[in-house]
Image: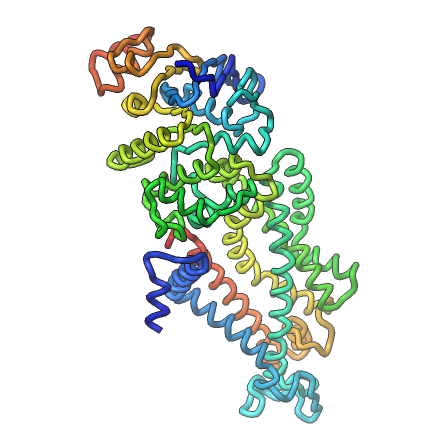
Amino acid sequence: MTAVTSWLRADVTTSPLHARMQRAFYGWLRLRANPLAFAGFLTLVGLVLVAILAPVIAPVGYNEQSLALRLRPPSAEHWFGTDELGRDIFARIVWGARITIYISTLVAVIAAPIGLAVGTTAGYFGGWTDTVLMRINDMFLSFPGLILALGFVAALGPGIGNAVIAIALTAWPPIARLARAETLTIRASDYIAAVRIQGAGPMRIILRHIVPMCVPSVVVRITLNMAGIILTAAGLGFLGLGAQPPTPEWGAMLSTGRQNMLGAWWIAAVPGIAILLTSLAFNLFGDGLRDVLDPRSE
Amino acid sequence: MTEPAMIDVNTLRISFGHGASLVHAVDGVSFTVREGETFGLVGESGCGKSTVLRALCGLNPAWSGDISIAGAALARPPDRAFFRRVQMVFQDPYGSLHPRHTVNTTLGEPLAIHGIGDRDRRIVEVLEQVGLGPAFRYRYPHQLSGGQRQRLAIARALILEPRVLLLDEPTSALDVSVQAEILNLLTDLRRARGLTCILVSHDLAVVAHMCNRLAVMMQGRIVEELDVAALAEGRTATEYGTGLLTASRGYDRRLAAAFVEKTEE
């Protein structure tokens, strides 16, 4: 262990891998030094573990109905109680973690590259390229995210796959804006001038020199947006346009719990708390990530 | 002085803005630099000396006039081969190095762009030449001092083995103690490689140390050209040149008063 640590702390890095590992190591130390961000990170790691281990944690499955046991309050047997069909809410929350992670990763994977590509291209080339791309961007930005997602889902048909596409389509414009703003400052810098007088073409400059500088703020931004994305997904579920029953999507669970809210508060409260905690964890982690990814603070 | 002209600039004009806000940053500048010579461009801030340099290396396409380097006219945009002949060292080593690229990546990039092989050997060799050992190869710029960064910037400019090196105030962002080191390094490299250099500076001591000839610029024009011997003896032909020379020797109450009188007139 000490051998590994001293290798990571070495004054002289001896290979590209070593240099990268050292940077990651110092980033990790900075994350550890920030208790709130680290708590957010642990919560997210916990969420991923729960999602992976769902069959072990909740072997009953999310759709075992038992009408004799409906609307039971939380107890030793059913930690979070049961819903209106007698399904164990704990099991549904655990299996629902998979859906939440599925939605958030897929949205990030779709929205971040689109936003980065549009933003850096617009920022680097400027002129009419910038005007055209940014006006398209404005068209997307001028609708509230949920309304736009509703529109897309209505056109594409309800379902979790379409919900992801719809949310991704509403998530890229702020990222493009951010990447463009960053690109405008980066492209005026001397290190871009230096690579230009080495004879590099625009594609190379954007991909190898501008994008790596934009990635940290985009990662931070999308992590902070993740709370909103999860809430939008839950909102679509709540309106019946996202995951369809009996899928244990947290927003949809919240929606059905609403009918029994006065008599059985736990049906709505538990998925609500799960959404809240996950969004909060993403927010805290995103905030801390800003320090971790800044190369100048090493 | 029989060497052929390496850089020939004829009535170069560069302007920024349109209409009422049009500014002629460079207004009809002509000069010639022979092969192996180091030519200084001096003048106060904003006189257009850096603008000339940026046009010479193809960073600013909005110029008119004639520029020819190594006998070939400068195209807009320049072809890729041009950049193997002409390279530049920037003023601020904190801004001219990509913060997320290691020394290795920074030096490998020009080789990759021009499809030059044998990268390991070239990188180690050029690091050696600028006085950075192989231990620096996998560091990030933030792990280097200002002087080390400027050495890396020089290495990056030299790895393509250019014949012309443009220096934009290469020492003004550095500590005084490091300035001399960098100047000596540049002098050695220039001699060893037979480089033709243009040095932009407002520090006449640096120019006297590095250059064979220099031109004094004022408000986008060259007001005077002299050689370094004349500079050392203080033989300047114009009033402005004399003023600049006197100003560089330190603060002079009478001189300052004279300048104030002149601006009030």
Q: Is residue B114 above or below residue B38?
A: below
Q: At x 52% / y 29%, what residue is drawn?
A: B59
Residue most extreme to the front: B2
Q: Position of residue B110 (x, y in %)?
A: 51, 41
Q: Position of residue A107 (x, y in %)?
A: 64, 61
Residue most extreme to the bottom: A68
User: Which color mode does the image show?
Assistant: rainbow
Q: Quadrant of residue B223?
A: top left
The answer to whether residue B69 is seen in the rendering is no
Q: Position of residue A274 (x, y in %)?
A: 56, 73
Q: At x 41% / y 28%, what residue is drawn?
A: B195
- A291 or B70: which is nearer to us? B70
Q: Quadrant of residue B32?
A: top left
- For residue A81, side relative to residue A291 (left or right): right
- For residue A89, side relative to residue B48 (left or right): right
- For residue B158, side relative to residue A121 (left or right): left
Q: Position of residue A270 (x, y in %)?
A: 57, 77
- For residue A143, side relative to residue B61 (left or right): right
Q: At x 23% / y 19%, what residue is drawn?
A: B249
Residue most extreme to the left: B253
The answer to whether residue B199 is seen in the rendering is yes
- B248 or B112: which is nearer to us? B112
Q: At x 59% / y 24%, what residue is drawn?
A: B75
Q: Quadrant of residue A3?
A: bottom left
**Which quarter shows the N terminus of chain B?**
top left
Q: Is residue A268 above or below residue A204?
A: below
**Which quarter shows the C terminus of chain B?**
top left
